[in-house]
Image (cartoon, grey):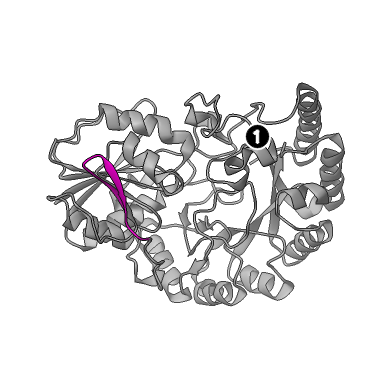
Amino acid sequence: MKVALLYPEVYDMARFKEQRKEFPPFGVLYLAAVIEQAGHLVSIEKVTPRQTELDLLEYDAVGFSLASSATYGFMREARLRAAIRDDALVMVGGVHCNFYPVESLRDFRAHVATDGESEETILEILGRAEEKRFNGVSGVLWLQDGEVMCEPARPLMRNIDDLPLPARHLLPVEDFVIPDRLAGREMRMAHVMFSRGCPFPCSFCAAGQTRIQYRSGASARKELRHLVDAYGIEGFAIVDDNFIVNKNKVGDICEHIEDLGLLWSALSRVDTIDEALLGKMARAGCIEIKYGMESGSEPLLKAMRKNTKQEQIKRAIYATAEAGIEAKVFIIHGFPGENMETTEATMNLLGELGSALSRVSLFRFVPLPGTQVYDQPDLYRIRGTHSQPDWDGDWSKFHIHHNDRHWWGTDEQRKETEAAYKRLRDFVEATWNRQG
């Protein structure tokens, strides 16, 4: 069987206007690897707003990966404009589909939609490609005579080490080996995923699953050795939602990769690290940890369900610097309730941290689909969601790239928030001289 998997190209959050690439489509890469391993022929096709009219007539099955809500519109356009055989199986999955599977199934006129982890599911789906009946296949929704049929959820895989390595060979090398993306250094690097999921309940974050799954140190080492031998990488960035949760698992990975001589970075919360773990990470080559600080205002952090304190932020940043690892922080400005006072708390904390911070990335708040904020618009006084009467049908507005839309509050509150944002932006740019 010949299978095409379509994905939307995603650009770097901080440098969207420069169209700098973020990281490869791991969901599609893992699916492609599993499909290849089962003996099928697979192609990965990129979709962009200017590239939606694809010739897919040679394929027996076509899958649309809805990697984000912001790209939903042009992915749907690709479904309408692509040439697909009438007898081909049409599948839809991905992050947006996991949140809104019924709408995705209907909008894409798909035969089947996956909900959740799909590496095991997709092989069962392909096995039903001719009859296009999916009763008994866990983790899918499908249409039967115009009626949506929903099968029970599929349990998460017990061991993600069992998955083959992502099928990077199906992409151009320049799409996954990048020269300048590791903590601002010029070196050949790649992105990797060593865990899935995040157990924390932040109301602004669209985490796909709350149970975290880790790969073993041996599995991580195997992938890195492959990237060194096949592509000559000198470093890597771990793109997991929150890599540093289980200290034993992180320690196991560090021990297995320490002798590879690679430099790397990872993302973390400020309340999941300690000095001993930071020492292990530094010895294994970690040069930067990116922390989701979000704000310096404790009332706002509580409203975000981040539930971290200023002292925890300071302890994590100082300990990271002491371990010889650079500390970068992400700030989200404009969460409902943001004002000049909360912004000054953020500026004061950043100023206190000072040179202990290597970089600061500042983003405006956006109510991302699938988050608690988005799904409870009345509670957070959010406007513009697809569940509200004034919905304009524009999914592309839910992007975090220089987004200055008026999501909540009165005109006066918006003016104050805008003025506060400009003060914070000018402070960050003047103090750290760069963002990203």
Q: Which of 421 and 206 is in front in this view?
A: 206
Residue at horizontal 44 percent and vertical 47 percent from the top = 95
Q: What element carries label 1?
A: loop
Q: Is 11 situated above or below 390?
A: below
Question: Mark 1 sits on what residue?
Answer: 382
Q: Is 342 situated above or below 189?
A: above
Q: Where is residue 351 in the image (x, y as percent from the top left)?
A: 85, 46
Residue at horizontal 81 percent and vertical 31 percent from the top = 420
Inspect the image, locate mark 1, and give the three-letter code of the amino acid beneath it: Ile
Residue at horizontal 41 percent and vertical 38 percent from the top = 9
Q: Position of residue 81 (x, y in %)?
A: 26, 26
**Residue 335 among those drawn in magenta:** no
> How many marks overall?
1
Q: Where is residue 231 in the image (x, y as percent from the top left)?
A: 37, 56
Q: Can residue 7 be seen in this view?
A: no
Q: In this view, does 56 lie to the left or right of 329?
A: left
Q: In this view, does 128 lie to the left or right of 137?
A: left
In terms of image quadrants, where is residue 16? top right
In terms of image quadrants, where is residue 83? top left
Q: Main secondary structure of the magenta part?
A: strand
Q: Is 51 situated above or below 310?
A: above
In which quadrant will I find the C terminus?
top right
Residue at horizontal 17 percent and vertical 49 percent from the top = 132
Near mark 1 (Cα within 10 A), the count class, few <14, some 14-19 or many ≥20, is many
In terms of image quadrants, where is residue 159? bottom left
Q: In this view, does 256 lie to the left or right of 3?
A: right
Residue interval drawn in magenta:
141-152
**Residue 144 among those drawn in magenta:** yes
Q: Is residue 327 visible?
A: yes
Q: Position of residue 269 (x, y in %)?
A: 67, 59
